[in-house]
Amino acid sequence: MRTIRLLVAKDLRLEWRTREITTTVGLLALLLVIVLAAVRPEPAAAASAMWVTYAFAATLGFTRAFALERDHLTGLRLAAADGGVVFLGKALVNWVLLAAVQAASLPAFGALFTEAALARAGALAAPLVLGGVGLAVVGTLFGGLIVQARLREALLPLLMLPVALPVLIAATSATAALLDGAPLRAVGGQLQLLVAFDILFVTASWLLFEFVLEE
Amino acid sequence: MTRPQAPAVELAGVVKAFDHRPVLRGVDLRVEQGRAVAVLGANGSGKTTLLRLAAALTSPTRGTVALFGRPPAREVRRRVGLVTHESLLYDNLTVAENLRFFAGLYGLAPSRAAEALASPPLAPLAGRRARVLSRGQRQQVNLARALLHDPDLLLLDEPYTGLDVTAASRLTAVLRAERGRGRTLLLATHDPEEARALDAEVAVLLGGRLTELLPADALDPARLAAWFRDGRR
């Protein structure tokens, strides 16, 4: 836990100083919301627009997050930081940054698509958090895998999005139902699928990340 | 009767290939504890790969690597410090924050970073971000980072690259002092003068193989230059 806390505190301090990821990802998210709203500013399109925005924002943010760490992985590994611990630290930071984008973009979705995006923010937190964790976990796993690759910016979405498809479908479906006024229990199936995906990928990534960091 | 100490580093028949192209073709190296050894080689000869194997950062394709007589598991890796010509520091953290972070990773108290920062060359740098440091200052901090956890083995990958004369002689003085404290040094360099300055034994990496250990003074610079040029003995 101590090492995870150190890694998270270090990453958040670096981000606070540079605003490198939040600025680029926030700007991209804002542009996507505006463009998608210009095409179809209807409540029925809100859930899809939200998750398209989060998926693109996540791929951009996660690529940057590992690019910043690329030259330092040797230092982390020499300090005998366990690969699984490095994974948990990076995934947590990725999720925090994605959650910040989700929270910051809700008012825009509320203004441009449907007021329910704000009125039902409490219920929406469930798919947003669980879906966000899923994206962060898959993105961190593949981000680590391709950190030394030359075309990593292009590779990450190619690798991450197909694997994260169950997350995107379940989260979009749950979000759409909740925006439509359904109670939380009505989307229990989707939420269970998200929980199962998150547990599966956190466990697998935690176990595999030592090998991912190996050359 | 005392048991003989295990060597700090022992490579036996090590082959390392990348994409089926061998960089090291059967390297044997034994570095006894407390000794200083320099691996000399031209650019691209595999020196960095050899040091990464010794640091257990990568595995051999064939052959064995042992650190202090044991396979290079995570616990043994903690006895190793590494200084490279590239900085492992975070540019947008201050020197103090960098050292506190790495001390934390090693499970050391923040006071250990404070102790390292108390030394004269580092004290004025504590509050500066790593990205504004000169090359020499950066290397001083790098060395402090590598020594934070008091490693028994210090690996140095071209540590003099980019240093001016003053910074280089300061680095030599620090490394000689560390050697005097009984720390094992394994240096990768292309410059035999750096080996001589540390009174290190030398082995030359040619064509993916390592020569036997020789005193640094036994190397004929002209012959060494020819070896580097031809890539073989």
Image (spheres, coloured by chain):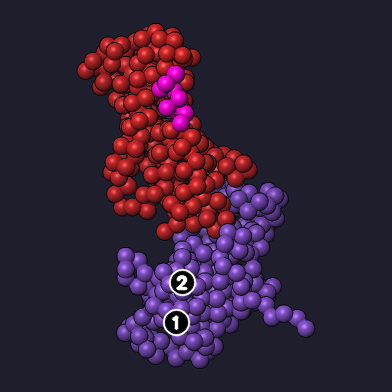
Chain colours: A red, B purple
Crowding at mark 1 (Cα within 10 Å: few <14, some 14-19, many 20+): many
Q: Residue furthest right?
A: B1
Q: Is A194 contained in the magenta span?
A: yes
Q: Nearer the viewer, residue A147 or B180?
A: A147
* Residue found 65% across the figure and 72% down from its top: B183
B110, above or below A196, in the image: below
Name the quarter where the N terminus of chain B is drawn.
Answer: bottom right
Q: Is A160 contained in the magenta span?
A: no
Crowding at mark 2 (Cα within 10 Å: few <14, some 14-19, many 20+): many
Direction from residue B218 to residue B18 in the image, left or right: left
Q: Position of residue B133 (x, y in %)?
A: 51, 54
Q: Chain of mark 1?
A: B
- Check disc 1 and give the amino acid type: Leu
Which residue has dot 1 on it?
B210
- Check disc 2 and give the amino acid type: Leu
* Residue found 70% across the figure and 49% down from its top: B109
Residue A115: quadrant of the picture:
top left
* Residue found 63% across the figure and 43% down from its top: A2
* Residue found 35% across the figure and 73% down from its top: B22
Which residue has dot 2 on it?
B50
User: Mainly helix, strand or loop, the magenta region?
Assistant: helix
Whether discs 1 and 2 lie on one chain: the answer is yes
**Secondary structure beneath disc 2?**
helix
Is label 1 in contact with label 2 (beta carbons under 8 Å)? yes
Q: Chain of mark 2?
A: B
Numbered circles on residues, count: 2
Range of magenta residues:
A188-196
